[in-house]
Amino acid sequence: MTARCLFVGTTLILLVDAVGAGGIYQHTRDGRTLIWNNYPSPGDEVTWSGSRDSTGLASGYGTLTWYKVQRAIVTGSNIAPSTGHAANAVVTNRYSGKMIRGKFDGPVVNVDARGKIFHGTFVDGKKATDWVAGAPPRPDEQSTERVSKGAGNAEPAPPAAGPPSLKTAATPRSPVQPTPSAPPSAPGAIEPAVKSRMITDFKEQTESVLSRVGDATGNFRETDRLDSVPQLPEPVSDSVASLVDRAREFRAKVGYETALSECRTETETVDALSALDQTTRNIAGSNASAANSRLAEFLKSNPAPTVDVQKPLWRYLTSMRLLCSRLEKEAEIHSERAQAFASAGRIGDAIREYQEAYRIFPNPATAEKIRQLQSNSLGL
C-alpha cells in the first residue's frame, strides 16, 4: 500500500467519523493539513501555522486563522475570474494553542476580528470552559471575569468551528498574536507537575518550529548572494511569531531565571529564529542595512551556539552577517564615487554610482539619495 493510498484512506475514515460527530475535518488553504471544523459553513477557509502528523492532521502548537470568503457578484463587462484567496477573503478569528489529531486540546487564546482577546480551555476540539476576556493569567491567579452570551462582548466562535458572523473587513497581513503579559517581578508558585508540563510543551514547540524553519531554508544552507536568501513562507513565519509570543508568556509565568536555567537552549533558539525571520523580511524588503544591524545585534549577544543542534542555524546567521558586511563595504566604494561626482556637478555619473551601490547593497538611505539627485536633475 502506498503512502498516498494510506493518506487518502485515513482521510476518508476521518471524514466518516466526523459526520457522526456533527463536524468535519477540513483542509487548510494549501491543501496539506487537516483541521477540525465543528460548524462548517460555505466560504470557510483556514490556515495553520504549526506542524502536522504523518496522516496530515494538524499537530503541536500553532495559530489557526479563519477566513470568510466573500464572493463578489458582478455583471456585464466587469465579469472576471477570481484572482485568488486574498482578493475576497477577510480574517474573522485567530486561535493559538496545541493541536492533537487536528483538534485543539488544552489552553487556547482567541483574537477576534476586532482584535479582542479571550482565553479558554478545549478538550478534543470542544470548548470545555467559558471564554474569559483577556490574555491567559498566570497559573497562580484566579480569573473571575466570565464572558456571557448576553454581554456586550459577544462570545467568540470556538476554534475550528468556522468564522462567526462577519463584524469587520480588516485583514492584517500577519496573524494578530496575543499580547503577552509583562514578566512579573516575582512569579507566584507553580505546582511542580504544571511547571514540568509547561517546560515540556515549550521545548516541543521550539523543536517543531526549528524543524520547519530548517526545511524552509534548505536545512540552513549558507548563501553568498542576497537575492538567494529565501524569505520564510508565511505559515512558517507565523509559527515563529507564535513561538516568540509563547516564549515571552513562558518567561512571565515561571520567571526569567527559571526559564534561562531550565530552558536556556530553547530560549536562545527562539531568539535566533526571530532574528532569522526579521532578517529575511528585511532583505526581501530591500533593506539590507536593517538586516545587517539585526544580525550584528543578535550575534553580539549570542556569538556561539551552546549545543550541537543549534550549529546549523548559527552558521546560517553568521553567513548572512558576513555577506551583508562584505556587500556593504563594496557598496560604500560606489557611494563615495557618487558623492565625488555630485560635488563636481556630474549628476548623471553620481546617479549611476548610487544605483550600483543600491544594486549591491539595497537600503532606504541610498534609494533616497538616488531620488533626490533625480529630482534635482529634473528641476523638481
Image (cartoon, grey):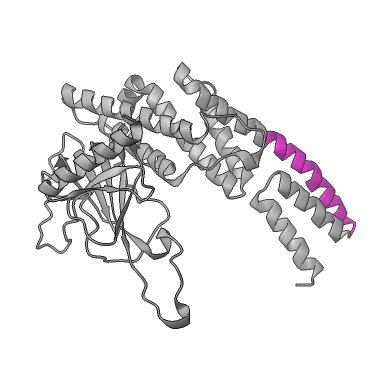
Q: Is residue 195 above or below residue 114?
A: above
Res 198 quadrant in image: top left
Q: Is residue 304 above or below residue 145?
A: above
Q: Position of residue 271 (x, y in %)?
A: 44, 32
**Could one spot residue 344 in this view of the protein?**
yes
| Frontmost residue, 41 versus 274 | 41
Q: Is residue 280 left or right of residue 62?
A: right
Q: Is residue 200 left or right of residue 193?
A: right
Q: Is residue 306 left or right of residue 225?
A: left
Could you tell me which residue is drawn at 83 percent across and 55 percent down?
350
Q: Is residue 329 magenta?
A: yes
Q: Is residue 52 left or right of residue 291?
A: left
**Could one spot residue 137 in this view of the protein?**
no
Q: Residue furthest bottom?
A: 76
Q: Position of residue 168 (x, y in %)?
A: 31, 66
Q: Which residues are magenta?
A: 325-345
Could you tell me which residue is drawn at 16 percent across and 44 percent down?
16
Q: Residue furthest front?
A: 1
Could you tell me which residue is drawn at 72 percent across and 61 percent down?
371
Q: Is residue 351 above or below residue 335?
A: below
Q: Position of residue 359 (x, y in %)?
A: 72, 48
Q: Main secondary structure of the magenta part?
A: helix
Q: Is residue 287 above or below residue 326?
A: below
Q: Is residue 87 magenta?
A: no
Res 79 quadrant in image: bottom left
Quadrant where the image shows the N terminus? top left
Q: Position of residue 29 (x, y in %)?
A: 36, 51
Quadrant where the image shows the C terminus? bottom right
